[in-house]
Image (cartoon, helix red, strand yellow):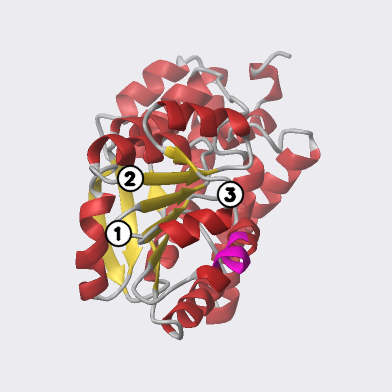
Amino acid sequence: MSDSIGFIGLGVMGEPICRNLVRKSGRTVLAFDLAKEPLARIAADGATAAPSIGDVAGGSETIFLCLPSARHVMSVFESILPKIRRGQAVIDLGTSDVGQTRSCAKQLVDKGALWIDAPIARTRQAAQDGTLSVMVGATPEQFARVEPLLRHFATDVTLCGGTGAGQVTKILNNMVLFETVNALAEAVALAKHNGVEPKLLLETLSKGSADSFALRNHGMKAIVAKEFPLRAFSTEYAMKDLSYALELGAQAGLNLRGAALMREIFQETIDKGMADAYFPVIAKLIDPSGFPQ
């Protein structure tokens, strides 16, 4: 097993993250994905293509998961659990259910292994550039073990607290992002209908208190540019992450009215056939005339 790295999930974010680990870690990387094309590309860059999830678990000291949802994580977890050995660490880079995260961690602790939640934030370009932000749920000792590996693809790596704290932080990050993007979409629509050019509006807002990462990326590069690609952070995935926030709110007895409204907006977007489009496509609900078919 030595110090090999395992990587399961070569999707939009997983493939560039894995590529950075191959290029920078100096370790053998065993990669697996159900899709042949990204697996072939990552193997051409120096990774070893593993024939199965079990082979990754059996041959790696540290196993990264970069999967679309908690359901996918559980499917992989059930496959690797019988193979897990004392001393191994599994790092979940996706946004997953907090309760499930803590359950997985307990099951690995019982086997002398670690489960660390380390969900990623920022864009695919950031994944390619190695400039992601990672929010980690772990003990300080566990964090010290995995931080050097995370630094191969992230410039900001934050210990947020114990197991599950990384997921809580990422879920709330996304909740705020979704509500901000909706506000940006409304502002762009109002600007256009009142004689202010949308690009000029957001460039001007970026110089004041309304500036944000969401404005400079989702606002400028998606809403103003009218670019909502399919292989990006889809409305369906955004709805999934928002549901985690609403679940946390319900557990805490809190009425998250803004998040609840976003759920309605995402559902309407999905109902109109835009589930697979990049989630700032919600702008089309506000001002359909601004996005000719």
Where residue 139 sits: x, y (%)?
Answer: 27, 76
Q: Point out the tag, 2 or 3, that comes first from the N-terminus.
A: 2
Residue hosting label 3: 68
- The quarter of the picture where the C terminus appears is top right
Question: Mark 2 belongs to which amino acid?
Answer: Thr
Mark 1 or mark 3: name the one nearer the start of the chain: 1
| Quadrant in which the N terminus is drawn | bottom left
Secondary structure, mark 1, is loop
Image: magenta residue range: 76-80
167, 66: nearer the viewer: 66
Q: Is residue 54 above or below residue 142?
A: above
User: What's the amino acid at mark 3?
Assistant: Pro
Callouts 2 and 3 close, C-beta under 8 Å:
no
The residue lying at 57 percent from left, 54 percent from top is 53
Three-letter residue code for mark 1 = Ser
Is mark 2 in CB contact (under 8 Å) with mark 1? yes
Q: Label 2 to label 1, Cα distance in Å?
A: 9 Å
Q: Residue at x 60, y 70 (%)?
A: 247
Image side of residue 246 versus residue 206, left or right = right
Would you say residue 139 sits in the magenta stretch? Answer: no
User: Dot 2 corresponds to which residue?
Assistant: 28
- CA gap, disc 1 to disc 3? 29 Å
Q: Which residue is mark 1?
A: 2
| Picture coordinates of residue 222, whole percent (x, y) | 50, 25
